[in-house]
Amino acid sequence: MSGMEQFEQQLRETFRRVDPPAGLEQKILRRLRPRAARPWPAWASVAAGLLIAVGGSLGWMRWQEQRLRARQAEQVRQQLEVTLRVTARTLARTEGRLKSIGVQQIQLQEASWQD
């Protein structure tokens, strides 16, 4: 037998038909069937409900807190705006009074705060 004949013999042996083992078809079909969904334990539904309730409550509380802070910030902004208007008006009146008595410039000194 020549080398080529041996090679062909090995190829035939390698590619010969092999019958599947008994029961293989049933095993494959069993694995392909969808598995029945396992029911949730009763405590899992309760726990999920509690998590949703607690999460929703915390989210609502945070939203309310943010709304409160926004309202407070707006109030502070409005108060500052009024304060600045009053201060500007008072400074303008004071400047007018000083000019009416002949004061053109005021020397300013830095104040120091001590306990």
Image: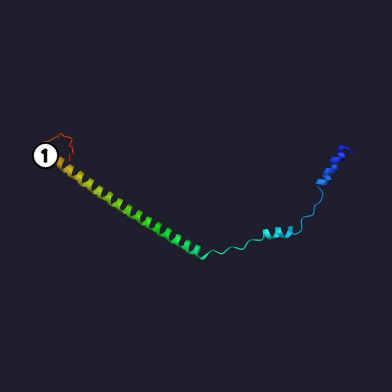
From the viewer's perspective, tell me whether residue 76 is left or right of residue 39.
Answer: left
Q: Residue at x 23, y 49 (%)?
A: 82
Residue 85, position as x, y percentages in the image? 22, 46
Q: Quadrant of the rendered structure where residue 56 is?
A: bottom left
Which residue is more in the foreground, 76 or 91?
Answer: 76
Q: Residue at x 86, y 40 (%)?
A: 6
Residue found at the far left of this picture: 101
Residue 111, position as x, y percentages in the image? 17, 37
Which residue is more in the foreground, 111 or 88?
Answer: 111
Q: How is the image coloured?
A: rainbow
From the viewer's perspective, tell me whether residue 63 is left or right of residue 91.
Answer: right
User: What residue did someone put label 1 on?
Assistant: 100
Depicted 23 relative to depicted 86: above or below: below
From the viewer's perspective, tell me whether residue 88 is left or right of residue 11.
Answer: left
Q: Residue at x 82, y 44 (%)?
A: 11
Residue found at the far right of this picture: 1
Which residue is more in the foreground, 71 or 94?
Answer: 71
Residue 61, position as x, y percentages in the image? 37, 57
Q: Quadrant of the rendered structure where residue 51 is?
A: bottom left
From the viewer's perspective, tell me whether residue 58 is left or right of residue 21.
Answer: left
Q: Residue at x 42, y 60 (%)?
A: 54
Q: Quadrant of the C terminus?
A: top left
- Residue at disc 1, secondary structure: helix
Amino acid carrying mark 1 in the image: Ser
Q: Dot 1 surroundings within 10 Å: few (below 14), some, or many (20 or more)?
A: few
Q: How many marks?
A: 1
Q: Quadrant of the N terminus?
A: top right
